[in-house]
Image (cartoon, rainbow, N blue to C red):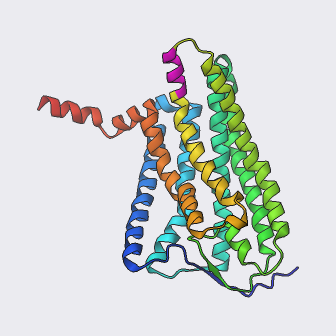
Amino acid sequence: MENQTTVTYFILLGFSYNPPVQMLLFFTFSLIYMATLLGNMMIMIVIRSNRNLHSPMYFFLSHLSFLDICYSSVTVPKLLTNFYGSKRISYNGCIAQVFFIFLTGTTEACILAAMAFDRYTAICKPMHYVQIMNSVFCRLLVGSAWAISNLYSMINTLSLLKLVFCGPSIIVHFSCELPSLLALSCTDTFLNKITFFITGITVAGSSFIVIVASYIQIISTILKMHSAAAKWQTFSTCSSHLIVVVLFYGTAFFRYLSPASTYSAIVDEFFSIQYCISTPMLNPIIYSLKTKEVKEAIKKLIGYKSLMSGIMYD
């Protein structure tokens, strides 16, 4: 069927409040975006420059930081221009935003699964860790994450192109996401919903199962340890990743899987902010605070020790 869409643009009405509130939100999201860029770039630079961090765990963390920058950049720059510029986004721009939200978000889910498997191997199979998590296998996991996510994004975006949008063209949200667009279509969206459900369960569901299964084995192994100190040390190495998983999956599941009868624009915006904007900013903070090696490497990079020694000897 040829696309007979009459809508050439959409209007993003997310955060359409009075000017003082919009000004506050503009500065808030600007600071969050700057913190996201600086924090994740810092993690990438620290891991690349410190040879002690050239291990599978930090290899995946570096890719996660890169993804957080990409994921946030898909929506935040347009959100910032919406406050004081045009709230319009072209039809093609909206479809492209859907694609890249899927691509970066799904790749991040796959990378989180790879990180969970890495922690499972390190804690539950320490004798075989080096053989299993070799550099070739780690690169294969990352490459597979991008390939699978690209296929997943293409399938759902191409099915979206078959829909007809007759108007209205108002999206009560700050970005183009699949649920918002499906609600505006004047043709049947059943096939799109089935396609999204099947592919989502296959990709995101499989990643989530890997994470859950890995942590069941990890917790089981930790509980068998006799030393309380060993238990705490082992758990602390996984706690940062576990926090990130809960923040990312918890809010994304609610946004995409909640029934239409419970729809609320404000609630949807809140959860979208969490997994699209806040989580990419929080990830480097969580890993910096909870991972001793990263914390020490950052201090070394910014000259913390030399600064403190200079103060003490002055």
Q: Is residue 141 above or below residue 238?
A: below
Q: Quadrant of residue 84?
A: bottom left
User: Can the viewer see residue 159 in this picture?
Assistant: yes
Residue located 44% across and 44% down the image: 285
Location of residue 4 in the rendering, given as x and y in whole percent from the top left corner? 80, 85
Q: Quadrant of residue 241?
A: top right
| Nearest the eye: 102 or 193 | 193
Question: In the image, what residue occupies the spot 45% across and 35% down?
Answer: 290
Q: Quadrant of the N terminus?
A: bottom right
Q: Quadrant of the C terminus?
A: top left
Could you tell whether 239 is left or right of 197 in the image?
left
Q: Position of residue 32 (x, y in %)?
A: 43, 58
Above or below for 7 versus 76 = below
Indicate the position of residue 232 as horizontal and vertical percent values.
Answer: 50, 23
- Segment colored magenta: 228-235
For the image, the number of numbered tags is: 0
Q: Specify the principal SS of the magenta part.
A: helix
